[in-house]
Structures are given as structure tokens and as C-alpha cells.
Amino acid sequence: MNLERVPNEEKLGLCRKYYLAGFAFLPFLWLVNVVWFFKEAFLKPVYTEQLQIQTYVKRSGLGLLFWVTVLTTWITIFQHYRAEWGEVGDYLSFTIPLGIP
């Protein structure tokens, strides 16, 4: 979709939909929202809906940063302590690595 051809009201509606859909544990949509609407929100000349689009883009960026932080922390902790957790670590693993940890 080319955002140049879309009316500003539809841009706002689409940005809002991506922002709200990100709350359904889909942080990838927040990334799409930030990348897709950044130029519209911050680099284009001022128009009526731009302030709301800026708000959704900023919040999407913060939500994405939060999810990246949480997932990175969990992955790091899990990779480091999985072997020490014994059976619980094995149950949480999709595949159980063979060998000595």
C-alpha cells in the first residue's frame, strides 16, 4: 500500500489498528507501525491527524522496546540456567540438547 495515495483519516485509522493489534501479543505489528508511519508522523508537513499518528508511533515504539527487553531478558536467563533447572528446564524446552551442559 502506498501511503501517499491514502487520505489522512485512513492513515490515522490504519495506524490505530496496528497499534491496538500489537496488544494481542503481536509486537511485530508495533515494529511495522513504527517503520511504516515514522515518515508520516515526523517528517511530513503538519496536518490535522498527524499529532494522533505521532502518539501511536511513539507508543508503538515504546511497546516494541518493552517487548524486546522482556524477550531478550527471558532468552538470556533461560539459556544460561536451563540446565540447572533440571526437569523443569527440560519441560520448557522445545528440543532437549544432548550432551553435558
Image (spheres, grey):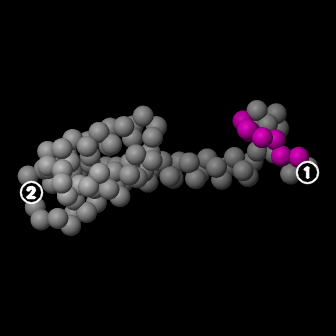
Residue 88 is tagged as none
Residue in the image at 46% along x and 37% along y: 25
Is 9 positioned to the left or the right of 79 in the image?
Answer: left
Q: Nearer the viewer, residue 100 or 30?
A: 30
Q: Earlier in the sequence, mark 2 or mark 1?
A: 2
Inspect this view and state whether residue 19 appears.
yes
Image spot of residue 34 (x, y percent): 34, 55
**Which amino acid type corresponds to the residue marked 1 in the rendered image?**
Ile
Inspect this view and state whether residue 84 appears.
no
Helix, strand or loop under label 1: loop
**Which amino acid type corresponds to the residue marked 2 in the rendered image?**
Tyr
Q: Nearer the viewer, residue 76 or 15?
A: 15
Residue in the image at 20% along x and 58% along y: 4
Magenta highlight range: 92-98
| Prevailing secondary structure class for the magenta stretch in the rendered image | loop
On whether residue 90 falls in the magenta region, the answer is no
Residue at the spot of label 1: 100
Image spot of residue 83 (x, y percent): 81, 45
Vertical arrangement, residue 83 with respect to residue 36, above or below? above
Q: Quadrant of residue 90?
A: top right
**Is there CB contact under 8 Å for labels 2 and 1?**
no
Image spot of residue 101 (x, y percent): 86, 51
Q: Furthest-right residue in view?
A: 99
Vertical arrangement, residue 97 with respect to residue 38, above or below? above
Residue in the image at 65% along x and 53% along y: 76
Helix, strand or loop under label 2: loop
Residue at the spot of label 2: 47
